[in-house]
Image (cartoon, rainbow, N blue to C red):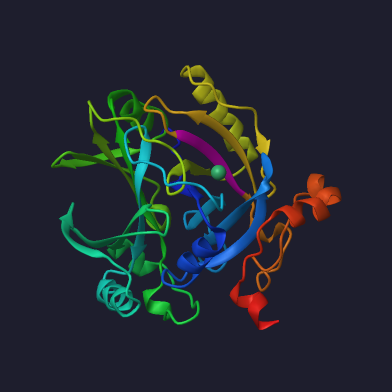
Amino acid sequence: MEKALNGIHHITVIAGNPQDNYDFYTQPLGLRMIKKTINFDAPDVYHLYYADEKGTPGTVLTFFPFPNATRGKRGTREISIVSFSVPSASLNYWIDRFAKLAIEFDVSSKKFGYDYITLFDPDGMKIEIVADPNADMIEGWDNGDIPKEHSIRKFFGATFNLNKAAETEKLLSQIMGMSFIKSENNIKRYSSGKDESLCFVDIVENVNGNYAVSSAGSVHHIAWRTANDEEQINWRNKFLQAGYHPTEVVDRNYFHSIYFREPGGILFEIATDQPGFMVDETFESLGTELKLPPWYESKRKTIESGLMLIKTKTSSKK
Ligand code: ZN
């Protein structure tokens, strides 16, 4: 059988104020900041990584924060919703939690049979928290006041808002090995990965929709998982043969990546599971210090002085 990509590796988003971003993702959502580094292509900008406690691929949401950025505008050629899985019996816990924390949310009617709630992050990115039976088999983890049994387990998926979906769907199904599940209302659902890596891509076609304007609250790209360097090269060749224009392999220190823009306008990345986030920090210290890749270490002082200080739970204890 043709090899398929193994679900989502990470999703990267543009943010505004990094403190607001940190506070929202670590507190109400209870993710762990597992890496504080810089955008390797723009070292004056943070790159903040939030995930489960150990940075498992498929749980990793990352941000490039620009403290004074205006909000992006939703539209086509972008990912319009990022969805997380929580255990099937946990949705009421999350509803109570957001109500107590005075965070606005909506309880929506089922989508493809799943119960879920929607909310927005501080920069206006739309988030869904989905009651997902597939999450029941993934062990929970503790973070702050969120009990193990209710913690976010992984990405449930992402929604693509496109002007023309056909070529994107062809790429997902014929080249990337995703499966069409079914259509509901104006959404076509595809799946990628299996078991713990299972996730969904929802395609919404909006033929006359205006293009999105990318800024704070806009998804920058989505990365798909591949196990190792060898598989990545095979994927790169496959995309080349299919007429796409993937970049050369780029060293992202925690994974190796190639990038290309899919036909609907969304930036795709293929990222390796290896070497992972513990290459420069221990499990206990993940996310506690500004980590720079070796090739930027000599510029640490200049880089640090240009970044806004983020008050983290760990550093406030010092
Ligand atoms: Zn990426």
Q: Residue at x 51, y 56 (%)?
A: 60
In-image side of 248 versus 68 (left or right)? right
Q: Residue at x 74, y 59 (%)?
A: 280
Q: Residue at x 57, y 65 (%)?
A: 33
- Quadrant holding ligand 1? top right
In the picture, the quarter occupied by the C terminus is bottom right
x, y percent for residue 164: 28, 25
x, y percent for residue 181: 23, 42
- Which secondary structure dominates the residues rendered in magenta? strand
Q: Residue at x 50, y 61 (%)?
A: 21
Q: Is residue 118 above or below residue 45?
A: below
Is-magenta flag for residue 78?
no
Q: Nearer the viewer, residue 287 or 257?
A: 287
Q: Which residues are magenta?
A: 267-273
x, y percent for residue 310: 62, 65
In the picture, the quarter occupied by the N terminus is top left
In-image side of 47 versus 268 (left or right)? right
Is-magenta flag for residue 272?
yes
Residue 176 appears in view: yes
x, y percent for residue 84: 37, 59
